């Protein structure tokens, strides 16, 4: 049996007005929202009363809440529920009727509950500012996160940056200029409106200009991806192709909320993106990763951004296995356990920090 020892990174959650909450599976969504609130902080007396009223509406309410708590599988959450609702200890019990499919659905609803919680006011702007990491303000300032880290930075102009794992950003802000350079990694920007000083983000040869809007930028080795969640931004190329090159010049383009743009040296692609896909791509802000039929190779590549552990795939057949579900980016043990239990993949620990994945032949 493989073993793993690691410290759980502190979860950094911030108030995000990005997504409309989907109107389906209402009871499951309400239960997931309650779990997210209890996971964040112990509810006050009024919230406890509201929770009790919700649970007492029917046995169905109570069952859904407890099943959702078990799928979330956080000891402190389940103990908290036991204490708040005067229930029998549920922390050591696992519902034998929760199949992998039901677990995947319930886990996804927990994620939606978290999104709903933060969207509808789980954290106030003041709370975010108190927990943000505000560093040296004299320009230029350098902000960076370690592998697996997430940092929320409040800039002096009122804008907010959320930095994903292994990200470095240089910031130069004054009364007349707001310039950011994404040196590597991924960041989400909530831009304070300032008519006299546009907010400019550079990522390689790509330049994004905004006034008051929200968008993410992910700088990869071979391309830059931009997702707009609010307002409008202008994207252009910082400099044209080399003399004699056949590469086209990137024209200045307006992107609106709900669009994603991928820029490569020789081409660019713009497409509409569904709300659910935006949610999936930006779940990293809650330290969650979501996959929907991705290959195991894609899952491993994405997960490897958030850990110093090495995950190797034994062969092409194993690499092509399709995987779906929600995983905590700071919990590699949870990912490996899920692959073993739900996707018929065997795990072999080859060194202290290396794991090999192989399709189970049994």
Image: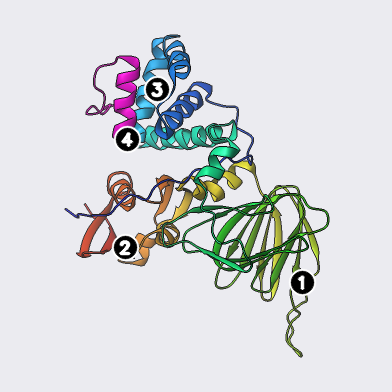
Of the pair 232 and 99, the residue shown nearer to us: 232
Residue denoted by label 1: 250
Q: How far is mark 3 from mark 2, CA to CA?
A: 34 Å
Q: Residues within 10 Å of mark 1 (few under 14, many from 20)?
A: many
Q: Residues within 10 Å of mark 3 (few under 14, many from 20)?
A: many
Tag 3 secondary structure: helix
Residue denoted by label 2: 309
Residue denoted by label 4: 73
Report whether 290 appears left or right of 228.
left
Tag 4 secondary structure: loop
> Which comes before the other along the chain, label 3 or label 4?
3
Q: Is residue 194 magenta?
A: no
Circles 1 and 4, Cβ within 8 Å, touching? The answer is no
Quadrant of residue 301 within the rendered picture: bottom left
Residue at 55 percent of width and 32 percent of height? 116
State the extent of the magenta-drawn residues as a range: 73-99
Residue at 51 percent of width and 53 percent of height? 133
Eyeballing the image, is 134 above or below 252?
A: above
Tag 2 secondary structure: loop
Q: Position of residue 202 (x, y in %)?
A: 67, 68
Of the pair 197 and 277, the residue shown nearer to us: 197
Of the pair 142 and 146, the residue shown nearer to us: 142
Q: How far is mark 1 from mark 4, CA to CA?
A: 48 Å
Residue denoted by label 3: 65
Of the pair 136 and 286, the residue shown nearer to us: 136
Q: Nearer the viewer, mark 2 or mark 1?
A: 2
């Amino acid at each position: 049996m493989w073993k793993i020892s690691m410290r759980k990174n502190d979860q950094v959650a911030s108030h995000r007005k990005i997504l409309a909450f989907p109107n389906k599976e209402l009871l499951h969504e309400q239960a997931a929202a309650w779990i997210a609130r209890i996971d964040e902080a112990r509810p006050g007396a009024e919230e406890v009363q509201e929770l009790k009223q919700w649970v007492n509406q029917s046995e169905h309410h109570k069952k859904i809440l407890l099943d959702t708590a078990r799928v979330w599988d956080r000891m402190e959450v389940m103990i908290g529920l036991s204490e708040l609702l005067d229930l029998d200890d549920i922390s050591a019990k696992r519902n034998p009727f929760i199949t992998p499919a039901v677990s995947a659905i319930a886990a996804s609803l927990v994620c939606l509950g978290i999104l709903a919680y933060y969207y509808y006011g789980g954290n106030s702007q003041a709370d975010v500012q108190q927990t943000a990491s505000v560093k040296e303000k004299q320009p230029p300032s350098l902000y960076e996160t370690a592998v697996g880290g997430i940092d929320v930075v409040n800039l002096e102009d009122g804008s907010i940056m959320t930095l994903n794992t292994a990200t470095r950003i240089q910031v130069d802000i004054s009364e007349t200029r707001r310039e950011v350079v994404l040196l590597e990694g991924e960041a989400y920007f909530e831009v304070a409106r300032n008519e006299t000083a546009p907010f400019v983000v550079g990522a390689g040869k790509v330049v994004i200009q905004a006034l008051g809007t929200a968008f993410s930028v992910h700088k990869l080795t071979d391309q830059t991806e931009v997702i707009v969640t609010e307002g409008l931004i202008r994207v252009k190329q910082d400099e044209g192709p080399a003399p004699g090159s056949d590469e086209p010049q990137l024209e200045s383009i307006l992107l609106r909320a709900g669009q994603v743009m991928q820029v490569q040296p020789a081409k660019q692609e713009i497409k509409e993106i569904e709300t659910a896909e935006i949610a999936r791509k930006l779940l990293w802000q809650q330290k969650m990763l979501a996959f929907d039929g991705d290959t195991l190779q894609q899952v491993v590549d994405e997960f490897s951004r958030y850990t110093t552990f090495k995950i190797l795939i034994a062969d092409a057949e194993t690499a092509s296995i399709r995987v779906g579900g929600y995983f905590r980016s700071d919990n590699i043990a949870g990912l490996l356990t899920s692959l073993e239990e739900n996707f018929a993949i065997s795990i072999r620990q080859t060194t202290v920090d290396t794991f090999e994945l192989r399709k189970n032949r049994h």
